[in-house]
Image (tube, grey):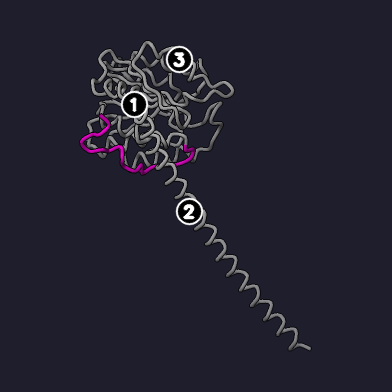
Amino acid sequence: MISTPENYFLQKPRYLDNPHGWIPHIPFGFFLIEKMKPSMVAELGTYSGNSYFAFCQAVKDLKLPAKCFAVDTWKGDIHVGQYGEEVFERITKINQQEFESFSTLLRMPFDEALNRFSEDSIDLLHIDGTHTYDAVRHDFESWLPKMSERGIMLLHDTRVKKTDFGVWRFLEEIRDIYPTLEFPFSEGLAMVCTGKTPDRDLLAFIKEFKENPKVSLWFEKLGENLLLARENELFREEVRKFRNKSARLNTSLLEKKKEIKKLKRKINSSR
């Protein structure tokens, strides 16, 4: 069931940035896009774009006739904090260069974006905004009419129970209403089949997921490998910067020593 014709979930994501919380879930994101072949993908809460650009990358590489939408104010919220305009500038640049033909950035509150979508139009919706119980419930219920007959919602941070995070609590309320699976690693990610006629292959995947713990573990290991590769890349970059800085300091030190020698010779010659 896990194996697909192209095994796209083994690909490497090309557009990563901090924070790293969603990186371990990217293999499943790739798998879901390839398996589901959605016609419309929407994301509520994009921030630096790790999840959204993973979806877009898969859509582009698999040549799917899909439309993608990212909804965010790109100003931050009570959980991620506030951040500068450089985040949106980077998102905009990548989107324009790589995905503009099918991807649209909607810089606005989630509720304001609702009227941009018709009912029964969204196949895949990723909810990753404010993580209080009231906020995630509101987002879920507000966008539910927009979901297609085979619609799937993804809920992030389902395992975070600190402070006022309440996604886990909302998930508990809907587990028996919709076919659902949950990845317990990297703050948790749940897939909820909200549509009336879910994809049969995905229902079979949920069944296998629940019966075979190795399925979740396998995706976890794939995600860990991506995260380790990313952290290793950043470490090498820091080492490179340190070496360049060290080389500049050494060069500056040599120049200062030469200046001191010249000054000493000048002093000695004037005596």
Residue drawn at the location 22% of the way across and 36% of the way down: 63
Per the image, the residue denoted by label 3 is 172
Which residue lies most toward the left here?
5
Badge 1 amino acid? Asn
Q: Position of residue 7 (x, y in %)?
A: 26, 38
How dense is the environment of label 1, judged by Cα within 10 Å: few (below 14), some, or many (20 and up)? few
Q: Quadrant of residue 178?
A: top left
Q: Is residue 18 magenta?
A: yes
Residue in the picture at 38% in, 16% down: 143
Residue of label 1 = 212
Q: Amino acid at mark 3?
A: Glu
Q: Nearer the viewer, residue 172 or 218?
A: 218
Category of crowding for the residue at label 3, using alpha-carbon neighbours closer than 10 angstroms: few (below 14), some (14–19), many (at least 20): few
Give x and y (percent) for residue 14: 36, 44
Q: Position of residue 59 (x, y in %)?
A: 27, 35
Work out which quarter of the rendered image holds the C terminus and state it: bottom right
Name the residue beneath numbered marker 2.
Answer: 237
For the residues bearing labels 3 and 1, Cβ distance under 8 angstroms:
no
Which is more N-terminal, label 1 or label 2?
Answer: 1
Which span of residues is magenta-colored? 1-20
Q: How many marks?
A: 3
